Amino acid sequence: MNGPAPDALGFCLLLSRACARLELSMADRLGDFHGLDFADFSLLHRLASAPDGRVAMVDLAQALGMRLSSLTRKLVQLEKVGLAQRDSALSGDGLRCASLRPVGKRLVQEAEVTVRAMCAQALGPATLAHLPEMALALATLCQDKAQECADC
């Protein structure tokens, strides 16, 4: 990229464009091969990554940057096709949880192969050397703990 180094605003605008472009290409490929869009994949992947297979819906909404009401609507759609479920039982801290159904787990595992290949292609080999620093910067923007990007 030529020109002056972007300031914070320029970086955030560039990041927004990059995210939009990546989401569009992911949605096309995921839709063609797996019947998912990238938002669905992100949600299913977060559920698949849960240590005990369940995530409190409040925590899931926060991790995905969604309002709880939007997450609930999305989960209702995923429930209808048998990919996920909202647990009627409450977690130990009194929060409603969500989890994957077996079909959802299998689908997200298959889709992850596609997404990993697309991510590697999108970033390219030169960028991979800078991945730890970029992941830390993005985790800061997401207000996540640095260890949440351990698989980056």
Image (cartoon, rainbow, N blue to C red):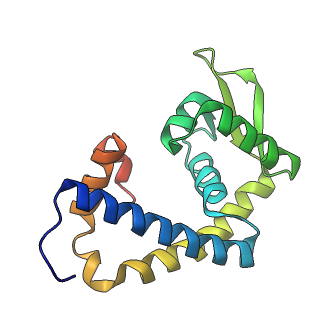
Above or below 148: residue 41: below
- Answer with left or right where residue 41 lies relative to residue 21: right
Residue located at (22% from left, 75% from top): 129
Residue 132 found in image quarter: bottom left
Nearest the eye: 3 or 135: 3
- The picture places residue 59, in percent across and down from the top left corner, at 53, 32
Above or below 121: residue 48: above
Above or below 95: residue 150: below
Q: How many marks?
A: 0
Residue located at (17% from left, 65% from top): 6
Nearest the eye: 144 or 54: 144
- The picture places residue 57, in percent across and down from the top left corner, at 62, 31
Residue 27 found in image quarter: bottom right
Task: Inspect this view and state whether residue 152 appears.
Answer: no
- The picture places residue 48, in percent across and down from the top left corner, at 61, 51
- Answer with left or right where residue 87 lies relative to residue 136: right
Task: Inspect this view and state whether residue 140 appears.
Answer: yes
Viewport quadrant of the C terminus: bottom left
Viewport quadrant of the N terminus: bottom left
Above or below 121: residue 134: above
Residue located at (59% from left, 54% from top): 45
Residue located at (46% from left, 74% from top): 119
Residue 75 found in image quarter: top right
Nearest the eye: 9 or 143: 9
